[in-house]
Image: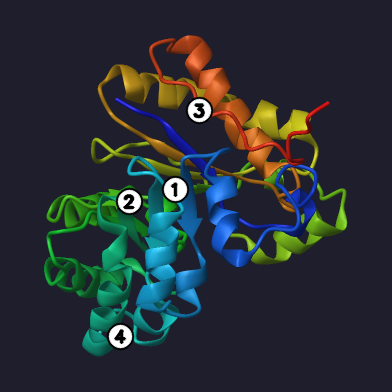
Amino acid sequence: MRLHVGCAMWTHAPWQGRLLPHPLPPGERLRAYATWCDAVEGNTTFYATPTKATVESWARQTGPDFRFVVKLPKPITHERRLTGADDELRTFLEAIEPLGPRAHALWVQLPGSFAPSDLGTLARFLHGLPRSYRYAVEVRHRAFFDDERSAQLLERVLAGTGAEWIPFDTTTLFQSPPTSDAERDAWTKKPRVPRRSRALTDRPIVRYLGRDATERTVEGWQEWIATVTAWLREGRSPTVFIHTPDNADALTLARRFHDDVRARVPELQPLPDPMPTEPPTLF
């Protein structure tokens, strides 16, 4: 039983010098982030497969208990739509091999046009993947949320390979009109789907998007505090990623989420102490 928490990235300009030391060379930024959180979304791999040397650097900067949820590249999921992408998949799997057990799950984020009628394609793709990894799927087509039969069919496909369904909870964002430029931008880009909180495996993964105002973000995640607490008491080990439209305080919010759950489940291990932003002085 363990709760991992993290953010959408490990380097972000508003964190530099305020939450993380600055300047830091690229080869040290993940190490600093890992003193705040013990998981991270691997969003950059969606846009380009990293070199193996880059992934080796990620592994060196993190301890064995750190977890990556690594997104499959866009050519596999969005351009080829899980068909005829064997070469791209092989290159990706070879690149991330240095992560070893740090690769918590490989994340199959599907486009909003990927519908219930495409579930046969998803089933064939998942069955063809190596069993050395866990897999998690994020869908955005509205039918999976509004039509119970479609949801059940998707759950059946995922259960066939032990894959998880990743919810991206944007309900707090869309509860009321945006009040900042970042929120207005998020309104145009983020999926507007109902909250879903059913775990399929012993390692559920949640992506939660709040607001730029801390109090609204915290208010919006209260149902997740209760859900994650229940999962832990059932013996599951969830991973929760905290987002806000501008992500300026996502690091501190992720730790606050962990603290709020730990207040209900005291046996959870605390997160490490964050790296100081300034070097220690003699006086």
How many numbered circles does the render carry?
Answer: 4
Residue type for callout 4? Glu
Residue type for callout 2? Arg
Nearer to us: label 1 or label 2? 2
**Left or right position of 160 against 75:** left
Across and down, in percent, residue 66 comes to 39, 44
Whichever of labels 3 and 2 marks the residue nearer the N terminus, that label is: 2
Q: Is 110 placed above or below 260 here?
A: below
Whichever of labels 3 and 4 marks the residue nearer the N terminus, that label is: 4
Quarter of the figure that contains the C terminus: top right
Q: Residues within 10 Å of mark 3 (few under 14, many from 20)?
A: some
Residue marked by disc 3: 271
Nearer to us: label 2 or label 4? 2
Q: Residues within 10 Å of mark 1 (few under 14, many from 20)?
A: many
Image point 52% across, 29% down: which residue?
A: 272
Nearer to us: label 3 or label 4? 3
Quarter of the figure that contains the N terminus: top left
Image point 16% across, 69% down: which residue?
A: 129
Labels 3 and 4 touching (C-beta < 8 A): no
Figure coloring: rainbow
Q: Residue 144 got which mark?
A: none
Across and down, in percent, residue 79 comes to 41, 86
Q: Residues within 10 Å of mark 4 (few under 14, many from 20)?
A: some
Q: Residue 167 got which mark?
A: 1
Helix or strand or loop: what does disc 4 sit on? helix
Whichever of labels 2 and 4 marks the residue nearer the N terminus, that label is: 4
Across and down, in percent, residue 172 comes to 66, 40
Residue marked by disc 2: 102
Q: Residue 88 got which mark?
A: 4
